[in-house]
Image (cartoon, rainbow, N blue to C red):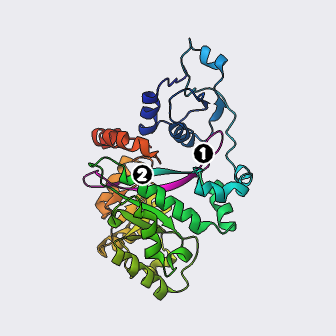
Amino acid sequence: MPTILRSQAEVMSAVVGNTTGFTHILLEDAELPIQRALVDALAEASPRAVVSPLTPLAALSENGDFLRGLLDGTRPTEHTSLRAHRITSAMQAGLSGDSLLLRYQPIVDTHSRRLVMVEALARWRSDPVALTPVNFVPAMEEMGLSRMLGAAVTRLAARDLSRLPGRLPIAVSVNLSVPEMEKRDIAAWLGTQIRASRLPRRRMFVELTETAPVKDRAHLARSMRRLNAAGHGVMLDDFLLDDPRQNLLHLPFAGIKLDRSLVQSLPHSARAREQVRRLARRGLQLTAEGVSSPMLFRLLKNLGVTRAQGFLVGRPLPIEALQAWNNRWRKVPLNSLKE
């Protein structure tokens, strides 16, 4: 039997419950109240889903009930870079409008399982569903829009986090490249982006991505000290086994994010486990990306990794779904979870 989701509550439950495997998703008519952000999240979790407009005939096919997801069909959604290139001429205008969307992937404490942070991940509004970064970020970088994209992501993240309920005073991280981080005005620039939301600076972190090499460590160190003095923590992203950036570990990072490939190798690689132990002994706050099983979650905790991120914990979520995800996460036993 197909799975049919007929209401906003059922769609929300599928999103926060990490439901995947949809092969057909029908999009609502404008009159229907289900939020488009939730449709995008369902489609992103089932990348081979056929995404189709909902027609009156389709709606009547189930006694008038609204069909949300249907486990039937084989044709994959077109989700390629070609779609992104079709809209490159509108990208700059879109960054100033409502084309940029954010999803938030939860990061939890490995000991208490408490939600402590989310990573802000960019999406681009498109039909039939939103584009993921691989389909539009390279085009933006080619157009010289990296800083404009970073500013828009930071503003949206600060706005969304400032509107969360008081019992979710979590931090958020945004990704910035080395060239952006090395700019002399980085601390003032970041402060300008979050000023309107009044989000405390201590809740806005920066993840230093690996898209470009560090050419001047002294220059980067000065930028990091400016950010630290302003209240922003900086994390080193996507740290690999035998990472060539180990010469950066003396810089004032707030933490290190372990790349998915390193994390996935831990159960069968003694060398990977020893590297993680060495990082933990340095007193660095370690966040594991790509956590996919309860066994791996427990292993990370035993190795001294204090934070976990990955599909076992939660997929990237619309801000509207974060509170519901948190309520569910606190109640479900770890052994009952699956990627």
Q: In this view, does 159 lie to the left or right of 149?
A: left
In percent of width and height, residue 157 lies at 45, 56
- Report whether residue 269 is seen: no
> Residue at position x 44%, y 34% from top?
12
Residue at the image point whose x is 30% and y is 50% from the top: 168
Q: Which residue is drawn at 69% across and 49% down?
A: 80
- Does residue 129 belong to the magenta stretch? yes
How would you rate the neighbour count of disc 2 (Cα within 10 Å): few for under 14, some for 14-19, many for 20 or more? some
Viewer-side label of 1, 2: 2
Residue 136, percent across and down? 65, 56
11 is higher (above) or lower (below) than 87: above
The percent position of residue 45, horizontal first and vertical second, equals 53, 41
Q: Gap between marks 1 and 2, in whole Å?
A: 18 Å
Image x and y of residue 169, in percent: 30, 54
Pick the front one: 283 or 14: 14
Q: Which of marks 1 and 2 is nearer the N terminus?
A: 1
Q: Quadrant of residue 266?
A: bottom left
Query: Can you say which quadrant of the picture contains the N terminus?
Result: top right
Residue 243 seen in render: yes
Q: Which residue is drawn at 43% across and 46% down?
A: 319
Query: Which residue in the protein does label 1 denote?
Result: 130
Instruction: Give the amino acid type for the residue marked by disc 1 in the picture.
Output: Ala
206 up-or-down from 41: above or below? below
26 left or right, relative to 106: right
When asked about the image quadrant of residue 91, the answer is bottom right
Numbered disc 1: secondary structure: loop
- Which region shows up in magenta? 105-131
Q: In this view, does 74 lie to the left or right of 103?
A: right
Q: How crowded is mark 1: few (under 14 residues within 10 Å), some or many (20 or more)?
A: many
Q: Which residue is disc 2 drawn over?
A: 160
Kind of residue indicated by mark 2: Asp
Q: Do the residues labelled 1 and 2 touch (CB within 8 Å)?
A: no
